Image (tube, rainbow, N blue to C red):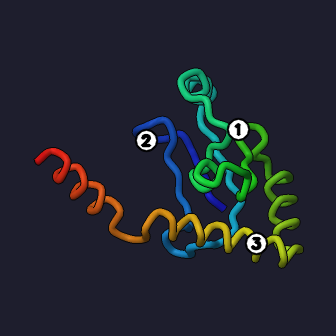
């Protein structure tokens, strides 16, 4: 599960297992203070909040935001995910596909090199 809590710098701070367990189907929960949430919602309009969902253009990882991120909702989503091996396989394949599209490790270095090349 990826968890977000609105403490510290920035609008959202989160922890995720993506680097430690690539392709791991996940349930996403984001909670922050209501003023921060309302400010972010007024500035950003996206269909999904989790980066894999944004990149895929579909809901790969169930998202629970603010009051939706209740223990009952999270447990239900996790139970559904754990009880459906076929869905887990499909989501894992889609997540690994996204990872491959992004080019794997070293993306920041490749982006910096591309910027320097364009600036030259």
Q: Position of residue 7 (x, y in %)?
A: 49, 41
Other-residue count near label 3 (Cα within 10 Å), few / some / many at <14 / 14–19 / ≥20: few
Name the residue: 80% across, 64% down: 78
> Pointers 1 and 3 in contact (CB under 8 A)?
no
Q: Which mark's residue is nearer the viewer, 3 or 2?
A: 3
Residue 67 in which image quadrant: top right
Name the residue: 15% across, 44% down: 119
The residue wearing badge 1 is: 66
Name the residue: 69% across, 64% down: 26
Q: Name the side, left or right, on which 10 lies relative to 38.
A: left
The residue wearing badge 2 is: 8
Question: Which quadrant holds the N terminus?
Answer: bottom right
Other-residue count near label 1 (Cα within 10 Å), few / some / many at <14 / 14–19 / ≥20: some
Q: CA distance from mark 3 to mark 2?
A: 35 Å
> Pointers 1 and 2 in contact (CB under 8 A)?
no
Q: Which mark is residue 32?
A: none
Q: Residue furthest left?
A: 120
Give the mark nearer the N terminus: 1 vs 3. 1
Q: Position of residue 80 (x, y in %)?
A: 88, 65
The residue wearing badge 3 is: 90
Residue 18 in which image quadrant: bottom right
């Amino acid at each position: 599960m990826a968890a977000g809590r609105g403490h510290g710098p920035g609008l959202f701070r989160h922890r995720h297992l993506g680097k430690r367990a690539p392709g791991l189907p996940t349930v996403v929960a984001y909670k922050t203070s209501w003023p921060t949430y309302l400010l972010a919602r007024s500035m950003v309009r996206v269909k999904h909040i989790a980066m894999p969902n944004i990149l895929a253009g579909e809901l790969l990882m169930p998202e629970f935001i603010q009051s939706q991120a209740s223990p009952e909702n999270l447990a239900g989503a996790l139970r559904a995910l754990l009880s459906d091996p076929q869905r887990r396989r499909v989501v894992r394949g889609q997540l690994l596909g996204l990872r491959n599209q992004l080019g794997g490790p070293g993306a920041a270095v490749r982006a910096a090199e591309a910027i320097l090349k364009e600036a030259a």
